[in-house]
Image: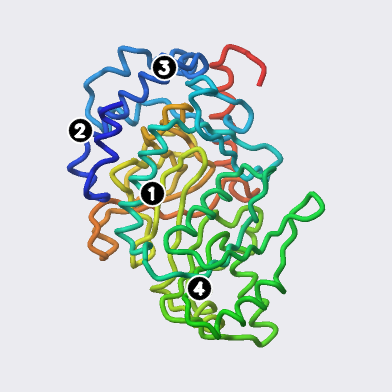
Amino acid sequence: MKFRRNLFSSKRPYDADNADELFLNAVRENALFHYTHCAEYRKILDGLNFGKSEILSEKPLSEYLARLPFIPTLLFKRRRMFSMPSRKIIIKATSSGTSGRFSEIGFDAGGLLCGLKMVLKIGGHRGLFSPIPCRYIVMGYQPHRSNRTAITKTAFGATFFTPCISRKYILKFKDGKYSPDFDGIINAVQKYAKKRAPVRFMGFPAYTFFLLKEMERRGISVNLPKRSKILLGGGWKQFYAEQADKETFYKLAEKVLGIADEDIIEFFGAVEHPLMYTDCVNHHFHIPVYSRVIIRDCDDFIPLKNGETGLVNLITPMVSATPILSVMTDDLGILHDGAECGCGIKSPYLELIGRVAPDNIKTCAAGASEILSETVSVLKGESI
């Protein structure tokens, strides 16, 4: 996997234009590996007329990626697919499974090393690392041996961006289930506000927003120590109906915690696409060199132009253990020209609009279902 290794060793994480050829070679390399080592992936590609000759074709990057078959994330929630034997898979992580089903994705040693390089480059670019010890308040799951979700591992990993004094979790595991502990977190916030060490929140934006609202309702406000930050990741999940706009969220954070919007950093990613997207200073998700994003029409899945809304197709050659090279999410998004942002990063940025699950987005929900049905049928009628 020399092309993958070279791609993830890129010194400039957002210099995508100068990495097109390397990215294309890494995608070909990854596609050929999965085609050779994963029977299910080979069936999908052969069924969609994208065999070995197409994998090795010399088409330009945009044309190649547009033709490269994608797999709906919904399929990974129904079927386990691996391109390596279990003894070579270092870690298996799952999605949160809010719909009752969850994906299980395997990670190989080479992929994990690439992921580490990516985190160091992107995290360094965004100023996430600091030698100053911090107290962490994790607005997510307390680690437990029964919990293998990627979001739990990611949140825990984020507490190593600085030396960690302590970790406090809002979702505590007790009597076989997780329950939120808002009182415990509010007490901790008030205690930490009187200390000198910075405080970093990390986790679900929904629980963070609910905490801010509860503190406001109780008339509690503090000024956390300098260099305190709010790191948001994991999406709103089942709380999409309560989702707050950024302006409301940021104003409330400053009112209740004394944390201004320049110290609020958002993350985007998925277990089926384990890239770390962090927002820029203008809070936009620019596409790093390690991935590409295609916005596809909800009806015919043809790639759309920048500025148009459609389904989000994510592509990365990072992982060899599971065929997640190109996945179709159930997210709606818009890809914008990088110049529209004004932060100085030239690569395009992704604006997430919502998910196709809500009933009021019937066309796209039908489209996602159609993709799943088509992919399943390509697997030649095997039970899922």
At label 2, which amino acid type do we have? Answer: Glu
At label 4, which amino acid type do we have? Answer: Val
User: Which residue does the image show at 67% across and 78% down from the upper left?
Assistant: 187
How far apart marks 4 and 3 lie (CA) works out to 46 Å
Q: Is mark 4 in CB contact (under 8 Å) with mark 1? A: no
User: Which residue does the image show at 38% across and 56% down from the upper left?
Assistant: 285
Residue closest to the eye, 4 or 368: 4
Q: Mark 2 or mark 4: which comes first in sequence?
A: 2
Residue 135 appears left or right of 180 = left
Give the label on residue 308, or none.
1
Camera-near label (1 vs 3) is 3
How far apart marks 3 and 2 lie (CA) works out to 21 Å
**Quadrant in which the N terminus is drawn:** top left
Q: Name the residue under label 3.
A: 35
Camera-near label (2 vs 4) is 4
Q: Where's residue 322, x and y in %? A: 48, 28
Where disc 3 sits, the SS reads helix
Residue closest to the eye, 111 or 327: 111
How many other residues sit within 10 Å of disc 1, few (<14), some (14-19) or many (≥20)? some
How far apart marks 2 and 1 lie (CA) works out to 26 Å
Where disc 4 sits, the SS reads strand
At label 1, which amino acid type do we have? Answer: Glu
How many other residues sit within 10 Å of disc 3, few (<14), some (14-19) or many (≥20)? many
Camera-near label (4 vs 1) is 4
Give the label on residue 199, or none.
4
Q: Where's residue 373, x and y in %? A: 59, 25
Residue 104 appears left or right of 342 = right
At label 3, which amino acid type do we have? Answer: Tyr
Q: Name the residue under label 2.
A: 21
